[in-house]
Image (cartoon, grey):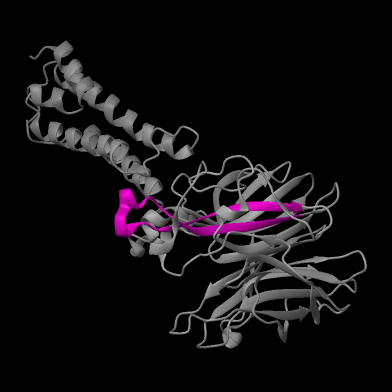
Amino acid sequence: MKNKKITVLLSLLLPGLGHLYIKKYVDGIVFIAAAAFLWYAMLFPSNSQALNFNSPRAYIFWLGFTLVYFYAIADSYRKAGGEANIPKKTFSAPLIAAGGIAFLFVISGLLVFQGYWRPFSYSSDWKREGIVITSEYCNMMANPEIVQLSDGSWMMYTHGWPRKDDSRNDVYGYSSRDGLRWKAEGMLIEKASMPAAVQLPDGRVRLYFVRNTPEASGVMSAISSADGLHFSIENGYRFLIGGGATKDISGFKQFYAVIGQGDPKDITTMAHLNIIKLEQGGYRIFFDEGGMRADVRKYGEKAWPMWRVRSITSQDGFKWTLDPGVRMEVEQPPLIEMQRVSSSAVVKIGDEYHMYFSAGFSPWEDLQPWKRWAWSGIYEAVSKDGLNFSIVDKRLLSGSDPAVIQTKDWSRMYLSRSEPGPDSCINIESWIKK
């Protein structure tokens, strides 16, 4: 009969050592392997959340950890009490059952950490209505922005480029009476991208868009006719940035922290505009800041592009200033693996602002593309003031570039999906939440 205290102490040090001490070698190897795997999952993966107790994933991990340790201690203590007649190299039924349970918890925890459960985390609140604009228009449907006109109809503004020619972007329009059947209205503004539309008190639409030239980069605006189809560009830029972004990631600037309001000259890329009216008067435009990459000193050629959401505010729609800080930052808890936050769509529901955004997880997507399906998608964040947002840790839908319209009875979200093929044509589909 072995000393029970020594057995317990060894099992407490590392599950399985107590079993080796009492010569239960097979049991000991099983427990050591399980414990070693748990310690590895906690300490070594860069995206492990075992110690992030703001995330429910940490509790799944520790439940498995506790089961392995406690059962190893209890089992070794029991078997040290003189069960010499138990064969040394056979498993007991309780060990098999407990080991199976522990194994399931360990695997489940690992799957959660690595994001493999995200495909099953879709929201049941959103119901798919189907494709509303097909890829016959191919590359003319990116980044949809939707506004309701005075007659109750809807206008969707997108940017795109002619098939086989991605050297330019133009703004295109689509009209609809019901939000489901859309009519293509053709190109509305040349050499413009990332439209954001707001209806003015007189019923016309002011469309903000990004235009980059060798001389300047930033946001310009145009005023529409009453039907929202014909635009006159207003003189000058509404908001200027530093610009100078390159298409090659090797020319991107290194990711930097925003201190206070920040300097517009530090922004090299501005994309995915979305505008809301403020209750106290004025407007706020949410936009993506890109043109940044992860630390090349750490990742070298594997450094990936990084995006985050910032905002600008204006009282009159002409003079815009940067808001302090960042609306949605990379690695913002609980999505601490997130490296790209983009394409925000913000609506007011009750007394809260709801932001729907595309999230990307570059360490897995860019370095290991085969895992891409398990991570990206549409997420939601909530704010009381429209500036400080808290992320809801649940993927809503797959897709990108969300656009949301809100009525008193329902919300409808439009998402872009690329169609397989050499042209990467885009379909736009709708989802509804009642």
Report if residue 306 lies within the magenta region: yes
Task: Choose between 63 and 201: the one closer to the eye.
Answer: 201
Query: Nearest the camera: 413 or 310?
Result: 310
Q: Which residues are magenta?
A: 284-313
Q: What secondary structure prevails in the magenta region?
A: strand
Residue 287 shown in magenta: yes
Q: Residue at x 93, y 68 (%)?
A: 202
Q: Residue at x 7, y 22 (%)?
A: 84
**Is 379 situated left or right of 412 in this image?**
left
User: Residue 23 lies in what quarter of the image?
Assistant: top left
Q: Residue furthest front?
A: 215
Answer with left or right where residue 337 lies relative to residue 124: left
Task: Answer yes or no: is residue 375 visible.
Answer: yes
Residue 216: give x, y in percent of width and height.
62, 67
Q: Is residue 160 above or below residue 353?
A: below
Say if residue 179 shows up in the picture: no
Q: Picture coordinates of residue 328 (x, y %)?
A: 58, 48
Rendered position, 290 above or below 106 = below
- Quadrant where the N terminus sits is top left
- Left or right? Give the position of 415 relative to 359: right
Q: Quadrant of residue 50?
A: top left
Name the quarter where the C terminus is drawn. bottom right
Write the residue at 14% across / 33% down: 27
Horizontal relation, residue 256 to residue 76: left or right:
right
